[in-house]
Amino acid sequence: MISDLKTLTILRGLLKDDVFARFAECQYNDVENFYAFVHAFYSRKNFRKAGLNFGKYVENLICFDENIFSETIAEGKRSDPIIEKAYKRDLEIIYDAIRSIDPKGFYSTEIDYGVDNKFAELYKKYSSQGYGRYLKSYALKFDNNELVPIENAKHIELSELIGYESQKAEIKNNIENFLNGLPFSDMLLYGDMGTGKSSTVLAMAYKFYDRKIRLIELPAANISSIPAIRKITEDVPMKFLIFIDDIALETADNALASLKTNIEGTAAYSPNTMIIATSNRRHIVKESFAERENAVHENDVIQENLSLSDRFGITIFFHPTDKSEYLSIVKQLAENMNLKTPTYELCDKAEKWAIEKGGRSPRRAKQFIDVMIASEINESRKNSQ
């Protein structure tokens, strides 16, 4: 009977979901509760994005549920046979309930009701990719003392990033050491704006999603939250890149002091977190004339700020892009996107674009190619009319 949903054990967390809880209240002849459930399902905020399929909705709830079974498998251990049996029983109860209320498959099409198949599928996913909220996205944010998945996180492939091959190789090697339990270092990536520092970090996190690594975006103003993040993640059987993007000269002194205490120190060491920061400057030092005039011990202040970059075990420079490198990136991106514009014309326009926009960089190259793609598509549509 559908009421058996209230006897769930390992997957009891599903009852915290409002739609599923209303589903659990349904009875064959309980029309009022049934329509309350249908209303809750079709009224949810992400309805248009998630689609109409209630069965798939429930399968997502099962997949993302954080419980003793999913966490144990993600940790690389074999779960207790009693827990596995209880988990399979829960799956049977859930699927029986869906079939009972939706015998014609109106709400639950494309569902494989084979419990053994679903169990094997989830076992493989948890063991290779992680569990719970960490399956929803490769990137998370720290909000209200919780790690929250960024479900619309930008997906960047490493193959999309042209140039800076030695920098990418060094970053990749360090992250692989981190994943393999070998000695690793926190990293500072520095260089001009638009050279691809942040994009490289995002692409690396996305690349290693299937190896249970996740990126945690942390604004520079919230650097003091690092200990709280480490407290949350210390027992999570995954690896985390704490990503602090664009540490600027204006970053508060107390934030920088907090960052220094959280890198390169035995007390601050955490085997499953790595700090990666980016900056447009090699040395994160406040250098305005007024600040230097007001500093009582000017040299001490400068040295204190200089010491931050020295705390990172690895510092990687993303050098400014010269003309030849810039045009090489443009041509490679054009080839990847199958642009039809002749190379000589493409390079001429790309150089004019860089001059107009105030400089050359991989970001400028990507922006230029996007404009060219739109131009070619519009021209093609115009000619076909």
Image: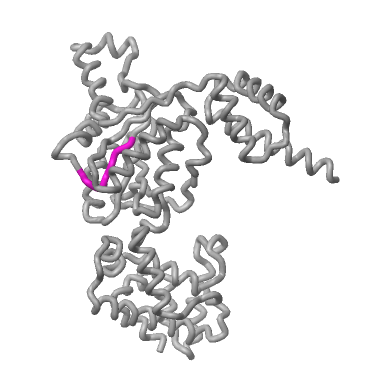
**Which residue lies most toward the left here?**
267
Specify whether 368 is left or right of 242: right
The x, y position of residue 238, in whole percent, is: 29, 53
For the C terminus, the quadrant is: top right
| Image x and y of residue 295, in percent | 23, 13
Quadrant of the drawing holding the N terminus: bottom left
Is 274 inside the magenta-drawn segment? yes
> Is 160 contained in the magenta span?
no
**Could you tell me which residue is drawn at 26 percent across and 39 percent down?**
184
Q: Residue at x 19, y 41 (%)?
A: 269
Q: How many marks?
A: 0
Q: Nearer the viewer, residue 38 or 314?
A: 314
- Asked whether 379 or 124 is in front, the reply is 124
- Residues rendered magenta in the picture: 270-276
- In the image, is 92 to the left or to the right of 29? left
Q: Quadrant of residue 11?
A: bottom left
